[in-house]
Amino acid sequence: MGSLKSEEALESNCTNPLDPDEFRRQGHMIIDFLADYYKTIEDHPVCSQVEPGHLSDALPSSPPYMPEPLETIVDDIRKHIVPGLTHWQSPNFFGYYQSNASTAGILGEILCSGFGVVGFSWVSSPAATELESLVMEWLGEMLKLPRPFLFSGGGGGVIHGNTCEAIICTLAAARDKVLREIGEENITKLVVYCSDQTHCSFKKAAQVVGINAQNIRAINTTKVTEFGMCPSSLKQAIARDIKEGLVPLYLCATIGTTATSAVDPVKELCRVAEEHNVWVHVDAAYAGAACICPEYRGLIDGVELANSFSFNAHKWLLTGLDCCCLWVKDSAALRQALSSQAECLRNKPAESKKVIDYKDWQISLSRRFRALKLWLVLRSHGVANLRKYILSHVRLAKLFEELVGEDDRFEVVCKRNFALVCFRISPSALGKQVLSTGYLSGDASIDNDNIKDGHTVEEPVTTTANINDVNKRLLEEINGTGRVFMTHAVVGGVYAIRFAVGATLVQERHVRFAWKLVQGHADAILRDRP
Amino acid sequence: MGSLKSEEALESNCTNPLDPDEFRRQGHMIIDFLADYYKTIEDHPVCSQVEPGHLSDALPSSPPYMPEPLETIVDDIRKHIVPGLTHWQSPNFFGYYQSNASTAGILGEILCSGFGVVGFSWVSSPAATELESLVMEWLGEMLKLPRPFLFSGGGGGVIHGNTCEAIICTLAAARDKVLREIGEENITKLVVYCSDQTHCSFKKAAQVVGINAQNIRAINTTKVTEFGMCPSSLKQAIARDIKEGLVPLYLCATIGTTATSAVDPVKELCRVAEEHNVWVHVDAAYAGAACICPEYRGLIDGVELANSFSFNAHKWLLTGLDCCCLWVKDSAALRQALSSQAECLRNKPAESKKVIDYKDWQISLSRRFRALKLWLVLRSHGVANLRKYILSHVRLAKLFEELVGEDDRFEVVCKRNFALVCFRISPSALGKQVLSTGYLSGDASIDNDNIKDGHTVEEPVTTTANINDVNKRLLEEINGTGRVFMTHAVVGGVYAIRFAVGATLVQERHVRFAWKLVQGHADAILRDRP
């Protein structure tokens, strides 16, 4: 290390990387940059128009040897990063489900990274653990979760990064509980259940924890149940598996599916599951936020029979990524699957058993102080305004649904449960050559370019024209304008355009504008047809 | 939903949760709060002195119904949160390994949450994917990683949240690769290898992916190899397992262990592993950052034979939590284990195969734009200053080591490799009644209150006094002052105090002050003895 001396000589030129005055100056600069970004966010194409490779072409291929001033970096962000963003916070973003940011959520993130504490155990930063437990009790109360899910009732809540993590952790807990009874060598016999509408993360989570890929059952759904999972189909599937000597382990029920916001009948599914001691996880990733409104709480009735419940506050409850809130009844099972012991982690409070060490409630050891942002959001808005916020999006979605209904060239494809409208140009608008393209079974991942025979057909399927292609073209053209952004789903063989209301900045004018744009492009498409 | 009308009446009172002007005002307030916090950070006890339950006693047990102003919330943060923090960013924090924050890293986090994009696939926000690929190439170049780990060489890098996630993902990749050959039913035969010094996350990761708990081999280490893993012990373990019909799968080698920053001999271990097609992961969580300095790069020689490599930029490379950088050679294996397909995720760029969809390189679908902070750190400091920064901590650790060496009541317990010094009051300082308390085998989780017989004893162990208790008391007293914070390790039965230099704000005066404090408390402890 002969270079130490010359390094020392350079040191006087080197500012401390966390110098308070420089932090203040640069921090204000970035806050102003973002405030300006929000003011002008509608000027950008919502969906980025760049081509693959745009950044590697624009930026140097090697890191700089010497420091660069923040001004230069911010300039590059303006010139090269911003055009490469799809603007999720734009009020014209109606794609996927939102991940809505807010001032309170961002301030929470700033404080989180600013304090920079690592709350893996209580002792490593007590307030991080205590605030998380407290705010999860608050939120549990807002959702009227049954007491066994709360710390005060013997269960408890934890903040994970995402639903996949919550499922991996609860699956591992359920798996180990069962394997302790039947022996680890029987892991290959375990079976998990979901529907063909369940988020693809579930299958991935099951494979990560070592469930045999052949033992993941996706129950078919249909339009008859609005793509909700049918309890009797579940019952049959479980019976079949038991007959074959397999061991039913875990069911994932969804409140607000990704494709259409369908709702699985939690109570009925739990009744089937409890006969066979199957762990039920209720995944309300999107729609859980709505359940803080009395109008929606009924949709999770039956959760009292489930084992775990999660929803993403980062979708529709203003925290921004990442904030997946998970509650479990049997926290001991979770800890048995996930606890880690090491000498360096030993400490008196942990041994006293009076404190929570959240490292044993999640995958990793380290963890960010995410509770801060959730706490800031709840306090900055209060329960009353958060409910108003959710309901204002529902009202805008309802408005959009009405606009679709008023134009007889269009149809709403399935029931609107929350703030998502799935719609399309209806087959009848294409004239006589198409009678109808109806619903096949509900597999959301069906290849819509090539609808296969052999599905349960509930309406006659015409082969004369592909209404799906028309709607696909419509969506592409709309997104191509850069003025709005929507995504699509395929349910029961039907290609639907998804209009998800949920951006923090969205107002009625954005919804009306989006509808005008849809109509305008439909005019042209329908006029062009032979 | 009869309440919609009354909700509408309230709406005019409700500011948009992302109003740009309010964002600017509140953002500046929080930046100033943090700048002031850094200025006065040394005024707080480093390790929080609160008792369990301090927050639930201080804050309301239910969420507020109406909004509260930020001023009130910040007031509560000052009064109730800050005293409950262990101040990881304090220059007097020498515990665990640091998680060092910096202005550039925090600005990156602010931009990340401010943009609020979700870059699960290229199309969902192209710049998020492209910047991550680019910055991982930059960092790979800084570490002189062999080309097969870089995109330009057929592999590639991805940012995960933490090492446990990186291990789970690479373990799942290795597992599925082998199970495709030998059949999923043979999952119970898979064996994974680490040392008794490997981070406890490894065992957890192995259990999460369904490795039988009986098939996790922790190779014993000893003082002879400075607690590095011995290749011949690994070889024997593998041979034993093969003889029993088991299938060796995965080896985790560590550069800079948690307890003492020991270094496993990567090249020799890889040579053993490659004979049996064992996937080798090199976990350089802590010490990887040092490998950007030419002085340290030699420690990962042999990585060219490994399959994957990860380190945490959030430990010692100024990004703050979370930023675990993972490179793999066989990214196809990773994607086969982790890819998820759903209709809503279909898009033209993905089908063109010209882009990376990072959702298939990690556990979850959603992901934060973490590349921003890493990019800001690299540009704001440049390679030259980052090396200087790392070496300045090494120099301070060396200074501390020298101070320990100058006081003959103390001893350095094991070789200092980076910026961690493990030391203790030496047995000789306790006078004649203690000859020595020497090293047992290296299990870091050994119960130091009750050192067991039967370990490989390398030095005579006296039973007349417990030198470990003396050092434990010394650490408790030092931490009890609130002036500094250190943690401990037990290696080979020896209780060592860990002095980890790495806080961003640390200067020579903090190190000298910490040593004076140690000496003062040792004076009192040794004086009190009979």
Image (tube, coloured by chain):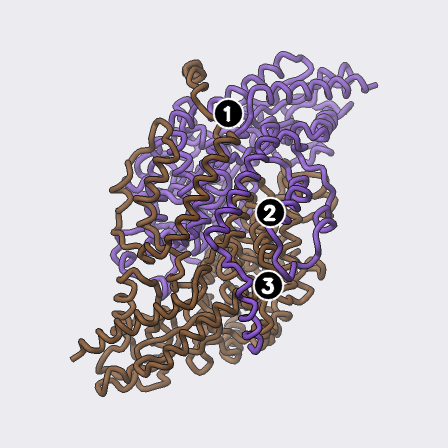
Chain colours: A purple, B brown
A485 and A209: which is toward the camera = A485
For the residue pair A223 and A102, the one nearer the viewer reads as A102
Neighbourhood count class around disc 3 (C-alpha, 10 Å): few under 14, some 14–19, many 20 upward: many
Q: Are marks 3 and 2 on the same chain?
A: yes
Q: Secondary structure at mark 2?
A: helix
- Label for residue B359? 2
- On screen, A184 above or below A517? below
Question: Tag 3's secondary structure?
Answer: strand
Residue at left offset 37%, top offset 85% = B458
Query: Residue A525 appears at what percent x and percent y?
Result: 77, 21
Give the farthest residue toward the left: B530
Q: Amino acid at mark 3?
A: Ser
| Amino acid type assigned to the residue bearing label 2 in the image | Lys
Q: Position of residue B99 (x, y in %)?
A: 45, 58
Rendering quarter of residue A423: top right
Name above or below for residue B524 compared with residue A181. below
Q: CA distance from mark 2 to mark 1?
A: 27 Å
Residue to which mark 1 is pinned: A418
The picture quadrant where one finds residue A248 is top left
Q: Earlier in the sequence, mark 3 or mark 2?
A: 3
Q: Nearer the viewer, residue A193 or A173?
A: A173
Residue B282 location (% of width, % of height): 55, 67
Report the quarter where the N terminus of chain B lies. top left
Question: Please, which chain is the residue tagged with disc 1 on?
Answer: A
Check disc 3 and report the residue beneath it. Answer: B308
- Asked if residue A246 shows in the view, the reply is no
Query: Which chain does the numbered disc 3 sit on?
Result: B
Q: Residue at x 47, y 55 (%)?
A: A19
Which residue type carries mark 1? Answer: Phe
Work out whether disc 3 and disc 1 sit on a shared chain.
Answer: no
